[in-house]
Image (spheres, rainbow, N blue to C red):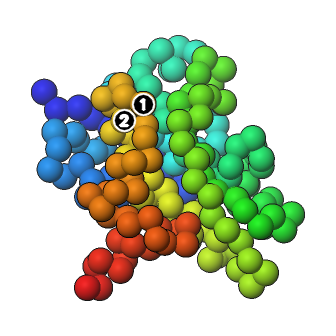
């Protein structure tokens, strides 16, 4: 019986296509929904840009993987990209965590940095963070579905589509598409 991943997306750069591409030859169905009730019936719910609070009862229904657009614990707020940009940080990134029984925080599974220089615009920063999510989130979700510890080794190997030589935004897959 195939496993099911529900995507609840509120982010500008929803990773739906990345999930569909990554899991297309695997026995996993991807469902995009706005309904947490529907998502709670899946094997895993990925929250991309979700900023609400989940009840303890909801958290008992399935596993919830939260995508947060900063390197937690920094910028643990509703607008982390905007706050990081306004503050002038030189490094921010993406954090993926499994939500626990308080419904807002969770155990960090993976983090990936994005470097910010003086000329980076907020739109460019959002795009780079979106690229990281599209590359990282499906790998982390696969590990969670399989009850395995996530390892960067597969992500950074050639079979993961990234040679590890990118600048942090992981555009290696874009380069392969052009070849």
- Sort mark 1 into few (<14), some (14-19) or many (20+) by Cα contacts within 10 Å: few
Quadrant of image for the N terminus: top left
Residue 149's spot in the image, x, y percent?
A: 42, 30
Q: Residue under label 1, please give it.
A: 149
Helix, strand or loop at label 2? It is helix
Helix, strand or loop at label 1? It is loop
- Find residue 99 and name its label: none
Note whether 51 is above or below 172 in the view shown.
Answer: above
**Closest to the observer, 14 or 136:** 136
Q: Residue at image x 23%, y 32%?
A: 3
Note whether 175 is above or below 169 in the view shown.
Answer: below
- Sort mark 2 into few (<14), some (14-19) or many (20+) by Cα contacts within 10 Å: some
Note whether 174 is above or below 75 in the view shown.
Answer: below
**Which image quadrant is residue 101 in?**
top right
Dots 1 and 2: beta carbons under 8 Å? yes
Q: Residue under label 2, please give it.
A: 143
Q: Residue at image x 64%, y 76%?
A: 123
- Horizontal side, residue 32 vs residue 169: left or right: left
Q: Residue at image x 28%, y 79%?
A: 177
Res. 84 in view: yes
Residue 122's spot in the image, x, y percent?
A: 70, 74
Residue 95's spot in the image, x, y percent?
A: 60, 46
Q: Residue at image x 45%, y 52%?
A: 136
Quadrant of image for the C terminus: bottom left
């Amino acid at each position: 019986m195939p496993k099911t991943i529900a995507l609840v997306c509120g982010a500008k750069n929803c990773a739906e296509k990345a999930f569909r591409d990554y899991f297309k030859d695997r026995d996993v169905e991807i469902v995009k929904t706005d309904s947490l009730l529907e998502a709670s019936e899946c094997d895993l719910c990925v929250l991309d840009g979700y900023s609400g609070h989940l009840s303890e009862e909801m958290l008992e229904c399935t596993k919830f993987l939260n995508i947060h657009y900063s390197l937690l614990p920094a910028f643990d707020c509703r607008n982390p990209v905007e706050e990081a940009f306004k503050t002038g940080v030189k490094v921010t990134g993406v954090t993926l965590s499994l939500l626990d029984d308080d419904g807002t925080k969770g155990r960090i599974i993976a983090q990936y940095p994005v470097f910010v220089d003086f000329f980076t615009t907020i739109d460019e920063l959002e795009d780079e963070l979106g690229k990281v999510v599209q590359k990282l989130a499906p790998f982390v979700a696969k590990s969670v579905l399989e009850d395995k510890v996530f390892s960067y080794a597969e992500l950074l190997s050639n079979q993961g589509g990234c040679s590890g030589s990118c600048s942090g935004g992981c555009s290696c897959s874009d380069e392969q598409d052009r070849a």
